[in-house]
Amino acid sequence: MTISVNSISVVEIPVTTNVYNVGSQQPIIIELGPVGPQGIQGADGSHGNTGPTGPSVTGATGATGSTGSAGQTGATGATGASGNTGSTGATGPTGPTGLTGSTGATGASITGSTGATGATGATGAGGTLGHYGNFYDTTTQTNAGATSANLITINTNAGSSGVSIVSSSQITFAYAGTYSVNLLGQFITTGGGSNYQVNVWYALNGTAVTQSTAVFTTSGVNNQVLANIEDLVTVNAGDYIQFYWSSQNTYMELLAVAAGSSPTRPASPSVNLHVEQIMYTQLGPTGATGSTGSTGSTGNTGATGPTGSTGAVGATGAAGATGSTGATGNTGATGAAGSTGSTGAAGTTGATGPTGPTGAAGNTGATGSTGPTGADASALPGILLLGGM
C-alpha cells in the first residue's frame, strides 16, 4: 500500500484492556485526516579543519656485537712406515708332457702314366698377299726446259691391290705400311752439246724427299741409259708419291719404243714402276692345334714313415710363498677444534616518537527548520493501513 500526500487513511490502533488483571488487546479503527507534505530539509553545516598530524620519530638501532675468533686446528699425526714386501719364492721345475700318440698310416697313392700327346695339327696356309702395284707408261716424255722439273706420268695399270695411280702421276696408297718402290726410266739424248746428265728424284705428298736424287749420264747422242730408282717408303693411308726428272740438255727424253719384228718383240715402255708392300707385318693364319691326349690315372702315394716320439717335459715347480705385508703405522690424533666466539648483544631499539595531537573537529552547521509533519502511520505500531486505495 502506498501513502501519498492528501490521501485519507484508516488505521487500526491496538488498545490493551485489563479486566481482573487479565490483559487483552482489541483494535480500535481510527480514520486519519490527509497526510501533510514533508518539510524542507535544512542545509548541512560546514566541516571543521583537520588538525596537523604529529611527527613520527624512530629511535636508532643498537650496534651489533663482534664475532668471537675461531680456535686453532690440531696437528695431524705422522703416518706409520710400510712394512717390507717378502721375497718371491723360486719357480719349480716343469712337469713332464704326456706321450704323443702314434700317427696312423697314410693310404697308398699311385700316379698313373701320362697319356700320349696328340698329333700336331696341319700347318696353316701361307701369309696373306700384301698390297702392290705394277704400272707403266707407253708415251715418250720430253724435256720442258734446261731448268724444268719434269713430272713423270704413268698411263697404264698392269695390276694392283691397295695401290693406284691418281691424276696420271700420283702413286697413291690406300693402306698404311712400308713399301718397296722401283722405277725404271729409259732415257735417250737425241742431240745437243756435250752435257748428257739426267737427275731423277721423288716427292711425298708434294714435298721432295731428302737424299732421293739419283744421277745418270748417257754416253752421247742417240745413246740410252736405263735409270733405276729403288727405295723403301713408309706411308699413311691416303699418302702419295710422284717422280720427277731434269736435264740441262733439252734433247734428253724418256723414250717409249714400239713393238718390233724380225724377230717379233713387244713394245718397250718409257717408264716401268713396281710397288710392293714389305710383309714383315703381314702374317698368315695359324693352323689348327691338334687335340690333347687323355691324361693317365694318378698312381698311389707311397706310405709315410712313422713320426718319432717327443721327449718328456720336466715338471713345473711350486711357486714360492709371498712375503707378508708390513703393518701400517698409526694415524696421528686430530687436534681439538677452537671454541666459537660469543655473539655480540643486539642494540636496543630506539623509543617511538609521540603521535601528534588530533585537530579539533569543525563546527556543525545549523539545522534548517522542519516543516509540519503529518500523521506518521509508521510511528504507530500495529496500525493496519486501510486508506489510499
Image: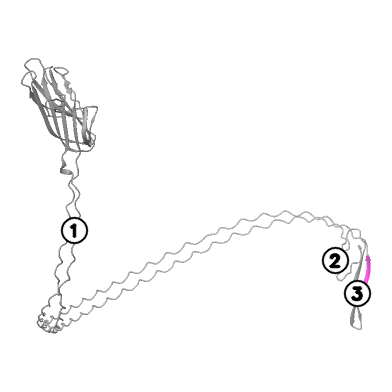
Give whichever of 325, 216 is nearer the camera.
216
Residue corresponding to mark 2: 378
- Which disc is residue 12 wearing? none
As drawn, 39 above or below 109: above
Classified by dominant secondary structure, the portion drawn in magenta counts as: strand
Give whichever of 153, 270 is nearer the camera.
270
Q: Secondary structure at mark 3?
A: strand
Q: Going 58% across and 61% down the picture, which residue do you hit?
A: 355
Horizontal placement of 146 versus 341: left or right? left
Where does residue 143 sit, x and y in percent of width and height? Answer: 15, 19
Q: Secondary structure at mark 2?
A: helix
Category of crowding for the residue at label 3, using alpha-carbon neighbours closer than 10 angstroms: few (below 14), some (14–19), many (at least 20): few
Q: Give yes or no for contact between labels 1 and 3 (Cβ–Cβ under 8 Å).
A: no
Q: Earlier in the sequence, mark 1 or mark 3?
A: 3
Residue corresponding to mark 3: 15
Q: Quadrant of residue 335?
A: bottom left
As drawn, 290 above or below 251: below
Q: Earlier in the sequence, mark 2 or mark 1?
A: 1
The amino acid type found where label 1 is placed reads Gly
Q: Is residue 73 magenta?
A: no
Residue corresponding to mark 1: 290
The magenta region covers: 27-31
The amino acid type found where label 2 is placed reads Ser
Where does residue 298 sit, x and y in percent of width and height? Answer: 16, 71
Category of crowding for the residue at label 2, using alpha-carbon neighbours closer than 10 angstroms: few (below 14), some (14–19), many (at least 20): few
